[in-house]
Amino acid sequence: MAVRSEILNIVGGRAVEAADRARFEKFRPADGSLLCTVPRSAEADVAAAVEAARAARSSWAARTPVERGELVRELALVLRARREEAAAIVAEETGKTMELALGETDAAVEMGFFVAGEGRRLYGRTTTSAMPNRTVMATRRPVGVAGLIVSFNTPLPNYAWKVFPAVFCGNAAVLKPSEHTPASAAFFGELCNGCLPPGVLNVIHGLGPEAGPPLVESAEVDLLSFTGSAATGRWIAERGGARLAKVVLELGGKNALVVCDDADLDGAVEWSLASAFSNAGQRCAAASRVVVFDSAYDEFRDRFVERARGYETGPLISEASLERILAALDGANVVTGGERLDRPGWWLAPTVVEDVPGDAALSRTELFGPVAILYRVRDLREAIALVNDSPYGLTSAIHTASLHRAMRFADEVEAGVVVVNGGTHGSEPHMGFGGVKQSCTGWREAGIEALDVYTEWKYVNLIADPAKT
Ligand code: NAD
């Protein structure tokens, strides 16, 4: 299926226009050409989707977890069967390579299989009591209606990480995808609606500041699960918190990769390149800071810069993103890159920057583009201090042959993920993913930890009287 020229919302299982028929245009990042037009949804559209979710919620929650798990497995199987088609849509609307898009599609499929398996687990707990003859058990219950708001960067895994566990846990959901990835969201939404009862997953397209707030502020939405920037997350936390909704935020990073003087330099260079530049640096887990020991710095720098010059990054998602990053680089000591490529679309040359103080805005602001800053440090103590001197704490990596250095780094680094001798990567479906400080608000996505996001614990007390037997 090629990308449709006119995308539609999905409400109560039906494909619909925005109520006022307003539309916006979505362009291809690779060449700037028009890809499709998309509903520019507003309050009435969100309200209709929330109403459809509320209507579907109880009967969906009444199905057994085994049955809901089977439906999620079916979804994963359909997505796998259509992986080429799904990846082609993602590649076209983001500009990333088919190879990357296929990898992401497969990751979304795997998340489906992992979540489906919970159908025959979804373990609760039993516990003791001070009272005789009292049996206490804790069971997981759905939260209700979930508002799912996601970023554009890896669209299918982003939908899968939220939609699969949300619906599996018995919630009905409204997905608000990024305005930059409407085509993959339409594809995913249709696929889900082919397997799930109407209203269990609704998809509302639109511009963030227009379609997002009515979902955040709706009193009928019990849970808000958001993946995106810290700035938007802060606003959602304030507005969702004001009405005491459950608010779960997965936010940005300014992740660091440390290269020690005993590192395998070939491996360190390869992993640093992939960590900094793959998906054009548009990854929450991107290594935007590369911290190198003094004695290894010059050789690492020369090899890294040389390789960065030839790295195929793919375009940025929008003109606005490209302009924002170019403005942030203004005045910086750019070793390579730092300029727009001379071709249509939104391409930034892989960029390496040096001589940036740890407390400068460039060191502390997430750019979400193919920009790596190199830092020179004396030793591990200084490296860890620099890595931790950040508002964010999502992922981290260290390259060293020393177990002692690796363990000390793992112990002291302020991050939700640590990798030794690899890249600052994200997660796998069975691993809880998230960070500390401004990267997250304490929840973890994926893994069985996702069940904590999409369920509430209910404690059931059973008091039996042996005298009555
Ligand atoms: P963004 O904050 O601009 O947008 C994210 C989503 O929020 C989009 O769907 C957007 O339409 C919506 N939105 C915008 N304004 C809104 C509002 N006022 N109310 C409700 N919704 C609104 O972020 P982005 O540019 O799409 O994504 C990049 C960010 O996402 C980076 O910070 C990146 O690190 C982060 N991210 C984090 C993770 C993670 O797991 N921690 C994963 C991927 C991306």
Image (cartoon, rainbow, N blue to C red):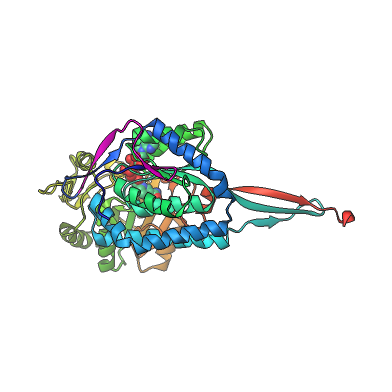
Name the outermost residue toward the left: 342
Quick check: 67 above or below 282?
below
Residue 292 percent across, percent down from the top left: 28, 57
Quick check: 307 above or below 461?
below
Left or right placement of residue 88 versus residue 33 in this view: right
Q: Is residue 441 visible?
A: no
Q: Would you identify the image quadrant in which residue 42 lies?
A: top left
Residue nearest the viewer, comparing 385 with 220? 220
Left or right placement of residue 127 versus residue 107 in this view: right
Residue nearest the viewer, comparing 12 with 153? 12
Left or right placement of residue 362 versus residue 54 in this view: left
Residue at the location (34% across, 40% down)?
205
Residue 243 percent across, percent down from the top left: 52, 31
Q: Is residue 305 visible?
A: yes
Q: Quadrant of the N terminus?
A: bottom left
Name the outermost residue toward the right: 467
> Quadrant for ligand 1?
top left
Residue nearest the viewer, comparing 105 with 436? 105
Residue at the location (52% across, 37% down)?
245
Residue at the location (13% across, 49% down)?
341
Residue 372 percent across, percent down from the top left: 25, 52
Q: Would you identify the image quadrant in which residue 380 lies?
A: bottom left
Instruction: Specify the segment rendered in magenta.
Output: 10-29
Magenta stretch contains residue 11: yes
Q: Quadrant of the C terminus?
A: bottom right
Left or right placement of residue 297 versus residue 164 in this view: left
Magenta stretch contains residue 68: no
Quick check: 220 above or below 177?
above
